[in-house]
Image (tube, helix red, strand yellow):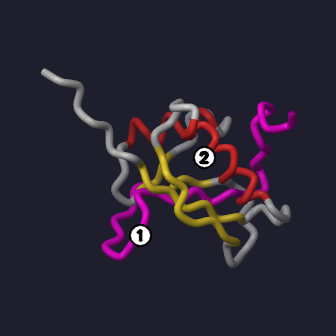
Amino acid sequence: TPQEEKKTIIIEILNASGKSGLAAEVTRYLRDLNNKGTLNLDVINYSNFPTVQPETQIINHSGNLEDLKNISLYLNLGDKEIFSKTDKIAISDAKIILGQDFTLPKTLNK
């Protein structure tokens, strides 16, 4: 059987860290991994979260859990819990809310 075409995971990144520009940096990092073929994702939107959050969260709306775990590993989030929340009007498969605990993976700090 031919290899099933993997669905691109659509992601939004929200900066709740209080660090200016973090969502844009993470977006560049993930898009770079996508361009290299490492991950299959599309960051469609990044912006600021209305409030500062202590912890980074991944909210799964309709994405593949395995793919999200993979993305989580590339963001050095380890086995952080992925929250599933059905959202009929979500424009993405998942949201990543960057909290104060988030640090960019070392590969970014070239």
Residue 30 x %, y %: 62, 44
Give the residue type at disc 2.
Answer: Arg
Residue holding disc 2? 31
Comparing labels 2 and 1, the label whose residue is closer to the camera = 2
Question: Residue drawn 38% across and 42% down?
Answer: 65
Q: Secondary structure at mark 2?
A: helix
Query: Which residue is outermost to the front?
Result: 35
The kind of secondary structure the magenta stretch mainly shows is loop
Is tag 2's residue or tag 1's residue first in the polypeptide sequence? 2
Q: Assign the C terminus to one quadrant of the image.
A: top right
Q: Residue at x 35, y 44 (%)?
A: 64
Q: Which quadrant of the figure contains the N terminus?
A: top left
Question: Residue 84 falls in which quadrant of the image?
Answer: bottom left
Q: Position of residue 24 (x, y in %)?
A: 73, 59
Of all residues shown, which one is farthest toward the left? Answer: 1
Q: Identify the amino acid type marked 1.
A: Ile
Q: For the residue carrying disc 1, how many other residues have a C-alpha within 10 Å: few (<14), some (14-19), or many (20+)?
A: some
Mark 2 to mark 1 CA distance (whole Å): 18 Å
Label of residue 82 in the image: none
Is mark 2 in CB contact (under 8 Å) with mark 1? Answer: no
User: Which of the labelled discs sits on residue 91, or is there none?
Assistant: 1
How far across and how far down the image is residue 68, in percent? 47, 42
Where 88 sits versus 95, above or below? below
Which element is circle 1 on? loop
**Foreground residue among 72 and 1:** 1
Q: Residue furthest top?
A: 1
Which quadrant of the figure has residue 100? bottom right
| Place of residue 34 in the rendered image (x, y in percent of width and height, measured from the top left) | 54, 40
Left or right: residue 12 compared with residue 105: left
Estimate how packed mark 2 is, as few (under 14), some (14 to 19) or many (20 or more) residues with alpha carbons within 10 Å: some
Q: Read off the magenta span.
A: 84-110
Instruction: Write the residue at 23% across / 32% down.
Output: 4
